[in-house]
Amino acid sequence: MKRCPYCAEEIQDEAIKCRYCGSDLRAPSLMDWAEKRLYRSQRDRKLAGICAGLADYLGIDPVLMRVAWVALAFLSAGIAILLYGVLIFIIPNQDELPRITSSEP
Ligand SMILES: [Zn+2]
């Protein structure tokens, strides 16, 4: 059992709608997602942290993201490498982001 964040009544874990107050319980997780920021990873970087940052943002394995980039680099005849260079300037470093979440260890 978990508690509804709106009326604090006990509800089913898998509930997507509170049966007491009728609140849509999927909304909070959607807001969490909206608060996610794209950044260049500081702790898991091979080149500039682009792959790890993107992977974290999309919720996939950083290794998969690197494989995807390499594959894309070949398929796009180098355009992906140019894009990577551009992203280094566009995406901020993890350290430069304002602290907005409390999920940091
Ligand atoms: Zn409720």
Image (cartoon, helix red, strand yellow):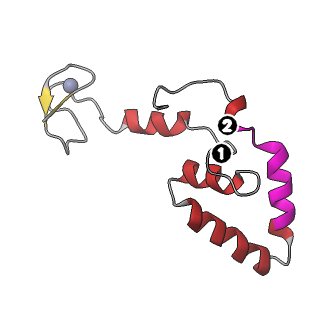
Tag 1: residue type? Answer: Ser
Tell me if residue 63 comes above or below residue 50 in the rendering.
below
Say the numbered circle drawn on residue 28. none
Secondary structure mostly seen in the magenta stretch: helix
Tag 2: residue type? Answer: Gln
Q: Secondary structure at mark 1?
A: loop
Q: Is residue 10 left or right of residue 68?
A: left
Position in image of residue 78 (x %, y %): 86, 73
Residue at screen point 55% across, 53% down: 58
Q: Is residue 30 left or right of residue 57?
A: left
Tell me if residue 55 comes above or below residue 41 in the rendering.
below
Position in image of residue 72 (x %, y %): 73, 73
Residue at screen point 54% across, 37% down: 34
According to the image, label 2 marks what residue? 94
Establish whether ligand 1 lies closer than 8 Å to the Cβ of label 2: no
> Is disc 1 in contact with disc 2, using a CB cutoff of under 8 Å?
yes
Tell me if residue 13 comes above or below residue 69 in the rendering.
above
According to the image, label 1 marks what residue? 41
In this picture, which residue range is highlighted in magenta? 81-93
Position in image of residue 98 (x %, y %): 65, 24
